Image (cartoon, helix red, strand yellow):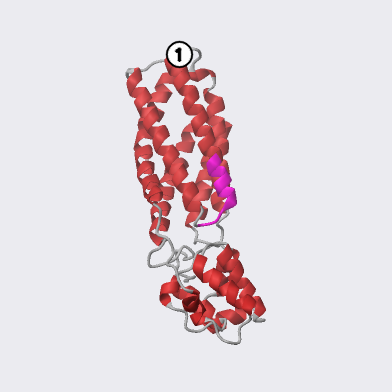
C-alpha cells in the first residue's frame, strides 16, 4: 500500500497528527486500538457520542462499544464513522473486513456435544463406582471419563476464545478456573483408578464442592452480560449459578443435574449463535433482539 493511496481519503485541511492517526487506524484495524483512535478523532472534532450518532446514523450504544473496544465493527461501519468525522472517500479496499470465527470455536462446539453425551455415562458410572458396586469394566469407565474430560476441556477453551469477541473478563477468569479444576480432578481420578493408592470416594465430596464453586463462578460471569445480549446469557447464568450452589452444598448434588443440564444446553446454543455472528451478517455487537447494529 503506497503512501499516495493511503493519503487519498484524508482531506487537505487535516493536521499531520490526524493523518497519521487515521492511516494507522485504517491500516491495522485492531481492537482496542481502533476504538481508541475513533474516540480520539471524535474528541478532536469536538463531537460528543450523541452528535456523532446523528452524523453517521448509528446507535449510540454501538458507538460506545466500538470506542471501548468491546466489538469489532464491519467495514461499512468504519467507513461511515470516518466519513462522519470528515474523512471523505475512504477506499473500500483499505478497510479490512472483520476476522471470521476461528476454527477452534467450531471445534469447541463439537467438543461440547461430545462432552454432553459422554458425561451422561461418566456420571452414572462414577455414582456406581463410589457406591462400591459396579458391573462395568474399568476400561469403560476410564474411556468415558477421558472422553468427558477432553470434550469439556476443549468446550471450555472454545468459550474462552469466544469471550475474546464478547468481552467479559469475569467470565474469562471463571472459565480458566473451571479448566484448571477439570484438569486437576481428572488426573487425580486417573491415579485413583489405576494405582489404587486411594479411592475416589475419599475425596468425592471435595471434588463435587470444588466443581460447584467453579460452576457458581461461571454463572456469575454469565450474569455479567446483563443488558448486553438479551436475556439468554442471564438465564444461562442463573441456571449455572443455581447448579453451582447445589453442588457446592453437597446436599443437592442430584438436584443440580437439572439446572446444570439446561444451562449446558443453553451454552451450546448460545455458542453456535455467537459463532455465526462473528464475521456474518451481523457483527458481534448485535443483540438477540437486533437493537444494536453496526
Residue 90 lies, in percent from the top left, at 47, 79
Question: In the rendered structure, does residue 139 fall within the stretch colored magenta?
Answer: no
Q: For the N terminus, which image quadrant?
A: bottom left
At a point 42% along the width and 76% down the height, the residue shown is 92
Residue 208 lies, in percent from the top left, at 52, 30
Q: Is residue 198 left or right of residue 45?
A: left
Q: Is residue 171 above or below residue 186?
A: below
Residue 229 lies, in percent from the top left, at 50, 61
Please name whichever residue, 148 or 83, is drawn nearer the observer in this view of the structure: 83
Question: In the rendered structure, does residue 167 fall within the stretch colored magenta?
Answer: yes
Residue 131 in view in this figure: no
- Point out the stretch of residues depicted in magenta: 166-176
Q: Where is residue 22, by image quadrant?
A: bottom right
Residue 102 lies, in percent from the top left, at 40, 53
Please tell me whether mark 1 sits on a helix, a strand or a loop: helix
- Residue behind mark 1: 195
Number of callouts: 1
At a point 58% along the width and 37% down the height, the residue shown is 213
Mostly what secondary structure, the magenta segment?
A: helix
At a point 53% along the width and 43% down the height, the residue shown is 175
Residue 111 in view in this figure: yes
Please name whichever residue, 228 or 36, is drawn nearer the observer in this view of the structure: 36
Question: Mark 1: few, some, or many residues within 10 Å (few <14, many ≥20)?
Answer: few
Please name whichever residue, 7 or 54, is drawn nearer the observer in this view of the structure: 7
At a point 42% along the width and 52% down the height, the residue shown is 271
Amino acid at each position: 500500500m503506497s503512501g499516495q493511496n493511503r493519503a487519498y481519503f484524508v482531506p487537505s485541511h487535516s493536521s499531520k497528527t490526524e493523518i497519521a492517526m487515521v492511516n494507522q487506524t485504517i491500516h491495522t484495524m485492531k481492537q482496542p486500538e481502533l476504538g481508541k483512535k475513533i474516540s480520539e478523532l471524535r474528541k478532536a472534532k469536538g463531537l460528543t457520542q450523541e452528535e456523532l450518532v446523528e452524523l453517521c446514523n448509528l446507535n449510540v450504544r454501538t458507538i460506545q462499544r466500538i470506542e471501548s473496544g468491546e466489538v469489532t465493527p464491519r467495514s461499512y461501519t468504519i467507513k461511515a464513522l470516518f466519513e462522519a468525522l470528515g474523512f471523505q472517500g475512504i477506499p473500500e479496499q483499505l478497510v479490512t473486513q472483520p476476522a471470521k470465527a476461528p476454527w477452534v470455536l467450531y471445534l469447541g462446539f463439537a467438543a461440547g456435544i461430545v462432552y454432553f453425551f459422554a458425561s451422561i455415562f461418566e456420571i452414572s458410572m462414577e455414582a456406581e463406582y463410589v457406591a462400591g458396586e459396579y458391573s462395568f469394566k474399568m476400561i469403560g469407565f476410564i474411556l468415558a471419563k477421558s472422553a468427558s474430560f477432553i470434550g469439556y476441556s476443549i468446550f471450555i477453551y472454545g468459550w474462552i476464545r469466544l469471550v475474546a469477541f464478547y468481552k467479559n473478563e469475569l467470565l474469562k477468569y471463571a472459565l480458566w478456573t473451571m479448566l484448571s479444576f477439570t484438569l486437576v480432578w481428572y488426573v487425580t481420578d486417573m491415579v485413583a483408578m489405576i494405582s489404587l493408592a486411594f479411592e475416589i470416594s475419599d475425596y468425592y465430596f471435595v471434588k463435587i464442592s470444588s466443581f460447584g464453586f467453579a460452576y457458581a463462578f461461571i454463572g456469575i460471569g454469565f450474569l455479567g452480560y446483563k443488558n448486553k445480549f438479551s436475556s439468554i446469557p442471564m438465564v444461562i447464568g442463573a441456571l449455572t449459578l443455581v447448579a453451582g450452589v447445589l453442588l457446592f452444598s453437597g446436599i443437592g448434588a442430584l438436584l443440580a443435574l437439572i439446572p446444570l443440564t439446561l444451562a449446558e444446553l443453553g451454552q451450546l446454543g448460545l455458542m453456535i449463535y455467537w459463532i455465526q455472528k462473528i464475521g456474518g451478517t451481523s457483527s458481534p455487537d448485535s443483540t438477540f433482539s437486533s437493537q444494536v447494529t453496526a
